Amino acid sequence: MHALPSRAPLLSQDVAAVLWFVFNVTRTPFKSHKCRHAFSLAIDRTKILEKVLGNTEKLACSIVTDSLSRLKREPLPYDPEKARELLAKGLFEQGVELADLPPLRLRIYNHQRHRLIAEELKRMWKDVLGISIHIEIVSWETFFDEISKRNYDMTALSWYSWYKDALYTLDNFRYASNDMNISCWEDSYLQEVLAEAEKTSTLEKREELLKTAEAFIMHRLPVMPICGHTFRYMKDPHIDRICISHLGNIDLKWTTFT
């Protein structure tokens, strides 16, 4: 009788992608960056990592994936008291009372991970901020159509950096008219910084400008990063030279079997 082969080990590789929860900055209360920060500060990301993701992913520290980010890797803070303070200030700026704020629509497509995270965020925002969230789950086709019309208060999106350059992600926020900029946010200062980064002839200056742009977007927070993505797979010990791209795509062109 032949012995059963041992189970192949579970391997993983970080993918250049970040899960964002996106604010529609044309809608109340997200016209104020103070309110957007309040929603972020009200999230205990460590609990999401443990309870929802089973510690299978890494918490995101920026809108840009770790491998391309110029910022120091520091966990995004969880501060309920500060969250309530910023929410009050942001609502005051918009002339809105918390009691008059209707339930906010969080529209996501039918993806298990997005659903589970959305439910946890809904609970945290209610507990910390006293804000009710209505989660709308739709098919991918409906979701794509709705986000193109900016028909939501918040939504969720996994952003993949197709190019190994932070500018690819940062440039998404340059103009509100960009179809992929579903937050509808733009700022003239960011436009100036990115334009200068494109024109500069020195790598050091370009790196400095991209860092400035990334930090500025994280200050204004049109999208709220939650976690990175990891590609997990099992590989027979006899198979070698499998190439996995930064996006988690597998290439078997040079694979050998011993």
Image (cartoon, rainbow, N blue to C red):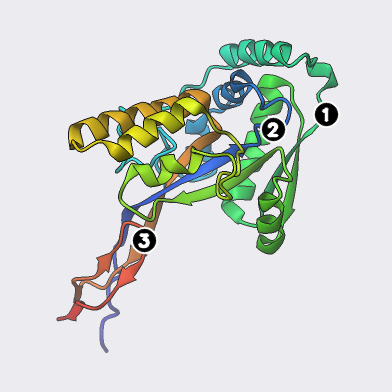
Mark 2, secondary structure of its residue: loop
User: Of callouts 2 and 3, which one flags the residue occurring earlier in the amino acid sequence?
Assistant: 2
The residue at the point 68 percent across, 63 percent down is: 141
Q: Which amino acid does label 3 sit on?
A: Gly
Q: Residue 248: which numbered mark, if any? A: 3
How far separated are the C-alphas under marks 2 and 3?
A: 34 Å
Residue that carries the numbered disc 1 in the rendered image: 102
**Is residue 123 shown to the viewer in this render?**
yes
Q: Residue 26: which numbered mark, if any? A: 2
Could you classify mark 2 by the number of other residues whose Cα lies within 10 Å: few (under 14), some (14-19), or many (20 or more)? some
The residue at the point 41 percent across, 29 percent down is: 192
Task: Say which quadrant the C terminus sits in.
Answer: bottom left
Residue 24 pos. (x, y %): 66, 36
User: Of callouts 2 and 1, which one flags the residue occurring earlier in the amino acid sequence?
Assistant: 2
Residue 230 pos. (x, y %): 39, 52
Q: Residue 169: which numbered mark, if any? A: none
Q: Are marks 1 and 3 in contact (CB under 8 Å)?
A: no
How far separated are the C-alphas under marks 2 and 1?
A: 16 Å
The outermost residue toward the left is 258
The residue at the point 83 percent across, 17 percent down is: 99
Task: Say which quadrant the N terminus sits in.
Answer: bottom left
User: Of callouts 1 and 3, which one flags the residue occurring earlier in the amino acid sequence?
Assistant: 1
Q: What residue type is labelled 1?
A: Pro
Mark 1, secondary structure of its residue: loop
Residue 101 pos. (x, y %): 81, 24
Task: Determine which quarter of the picture holds residue 144.
Answer: bottom right
